Image (cartoon, rainbow, N blue to C red):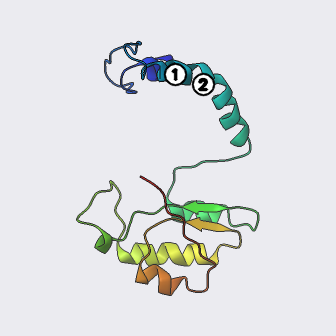
Amino acid sequence: MVRCWQAIRPKTNSISGWRCRFTERDAFHIKQWNVLPERLEIVADRLRNVQIENVQAELLISRYRASDVLIFADPSYLLDTRNGAIYENEMSDEQHASLLDLLDDHPGPVLLTGYEHPFYNERLKHWQGGRHRVNQ
């Protein structure tokens, strides 16, 4: 934690310089470090009863098929929304369709992220949807 937060670049797999105060802007890093314990406590409290898994979606969705389980799904974007492969694990249109079938059949709430697309709009037209623009 110290190495990550007090290094010039937050990389732990290589040597990095040490952050120190050269300018007024750099004082911000000290302030960040000083509030880190309180921020970690907030995160730990928020995640106390959360379970995060990194497994195939099909396995996860079938394992936790219950009305009190929220599924947060953030699949790779459909191939025709971008220029070429960018993900380590790409999904075909058929895999997207299969995922949507599983999510649609899930008895609990589902939060699905992605770009608006006719494929998703048509397939999920019976879902309650919403949009939230994220500033970059």
Does dot 1 land on a helix, a strand or a loop? loop
Disc nearer the start of the sequence (1/2):
1
Residue 28 position (above or below residue 116): above
Residue that mark 1 sits on: 1
Tell me the crowding category of disc 1: few under 14, some 14 to 19, or many 20 or more residues within 10 angstroms, Cα based: few
Left or right position of 109 against 19: right
The picture places residue 82, in percent across and down from the top left corner, at 28, 67
The picture places residue 55, in percent across and down from the top left corner, at 51, 54
Residue that mark 2 sits on: 36
Residue 136 position (above or below residue 120): above
Three-letter code, disc 1: Met
The picture places residue 132, in percent across and down from the top left corner, at 54, 65
| Residue in the image at 34% along x and 62% along y | 90
Q: Quadrant of residue 49?
A: top right
Left or right position of 5 against 130: left
Does dot 2 land on a helix, a strand or a loop? helix
Front of the two marks 1 and 2: 2
- Work out how far the residue at label 1 is from the one at label 2, CA to CA, in angstroms: 10 Å
Front residue of 41/14: it is 41
| Residue in the image at 54% along x and 78% along y | 101
Front residue of 58/75: it is 75
**1 and 2 marks in contact (CB < 8 Å):** yes
Left or right position of 15 against 44: left
Q: Quadrant of residue 83?
A: bottom left
Q: Quadrant of residue 15?
A: top left
